[in-house]
Image: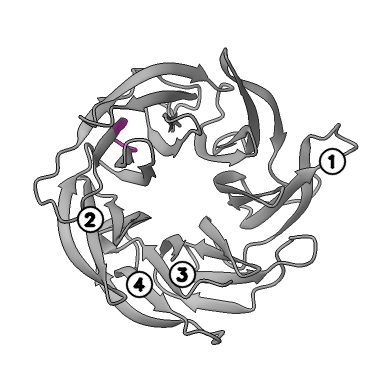
Amino acid sequence: MSARRLYVSGYTPTSGGTGAGITVFDRPAGDADWRAVQVVEADDPSFLVLTEGALHAVSETTEGRVLSYTVSAGELVASSVAASGGAAPCHIALDPASGALVVTNYTAGTFAVLSADASDPARLSRVLALPVGRGPVLDRQGEPHAHNVTPTPWGTVLVSDLGTDRFFEVRVDPVTLEPSYLRAYAMPAGSGPRHFAWHGEQLLITGELDGRLHVLSHSDDGFAVDYSVAAYDTGRPGGEALLSHVESVGGLVYVAVRGRDTITVLAPSEAAGGRLSVLAEVPCGGSWPRHFALDGGALYVANQLSHTVAVLPLDERGVPGAPTVQIELGSPACVLFA
């Protein structure tokens, strides 16, 4: 069944974007067309997450804020604002084990935890600074840069550090919400780990800087990289491959490739011994695919620099085709269905 509500956030003039904040779209039952029903002004709401009865956004500004809204009769109502725990928060998620919001602050190089209670005006962030380090890509890896966070099936969370080619496993105390480090894992030098996705029992990590998808397994000894594969068609000409978002759906893996402005689909290959390999690389329907989401047999791609969300239908193989719809709005950053 297709979703009936869509939230799209966008970069605003605060960072040179053209978006207004968060746009709410509605699609009545039986209707194929989305209609904008509300625009909420906010500074650089770069990532969104839904909890029960509330929507939360990180405001990717120097001050760093978490903006929370209650959902009332289908509309967003501003409820509270909390410090994100550092400058330029770029990702937010819900930790099911603690019921808390977890946030990564890119410029500050910190990870923070705060209550998911949107109506609490006194929420405080419990902050962990990522350990000092750097990577070999001098203009991007001079210091820690927390980028993404994802829960594990066993009750911890993982935090990627694009700046030091590491990711960290963190436990959040379910009572105090205090985070604590459990272990650090090294990634290939210069990979710039960005986004996580679970692919069955395997962990996928996009390397923003090396253009590779890294596939990891987990055992009692922790995580280990099983193999890495170029997340685009190396035989096809294109621009610089700066990977962003990744999703695993129905045995297929989708990766957004900025610079080349494409979506890559990877699938297990018999020729590669069951490892993931590129099934197809197709245009993203715009420029600079920052994020995407799947719904109703289509891929919705937030193309930041062409100011559209492109709706790409999936064929019988699960490969996106040419866009059937272009939803125009300024500098889209995140697409979220409800």
- The span picked out in magenta is 105-111
- Disc 1: which residue: 269
Q: Is residue 232 above or below residue 310?
A: above
**Which residue was labeled with disc 2?**
67
Report the number of numbered marks.
4
Horizontal and vertical percent for residue 315? 76, 67
Estimate how packed mark 1 is, as few (under 14), some (14 to 19) or many (20 or more) residues with alpha carbons within 10 Å: few
Query: How dense is the environment of label 3, judged by Cα within 10 Å: few (below 14), some, or many (20 and up)?
Result: many
Q: Earlier in the sequence, mark 4 or mark 1?
A: 4
Q: Amino acid at mark 3?
A: His
Q: Which mark is residue 71?
A: none
Secondary-structure class at tag 2? strand
Residue 234 appearing in the image: no
Q: How far is disc 2 from disc 3 in space, using C-alphas?
A: 23 Å
The quarter of the picture where residue 296 lies is: bottom right
Q: Which residue is mark 3?
A: 307
Q: Mark 1 or mark 3, which is nearer the start of the sequence?
A: 1
Tag on residue 23? 4
Which residue lies at the image location 45% right of the left edge and 31% below the top edge?
A: 160
Which residue is farthest left?
122
Under circle 3, the secondary element is loop
Q: Residue 49, how many percent across, how many down?
A: 37, 54
Q: Are marks 3 and 1 in contact (CB under 8 Å)?
A: no
Q: Residue at x 15, y 56 (%)?
A: 119
**How far is disc 3 from disc 1 in space, using C-alphas?**
35 Å
State the image coordinates of residue 176 (x, y, percent, origin top left): 20, 29
Mark 4 or mark 3: which is in front? Answer: 4
The Cα atoms of the two marked residues, 4 and 3, are separated by: 13 Å
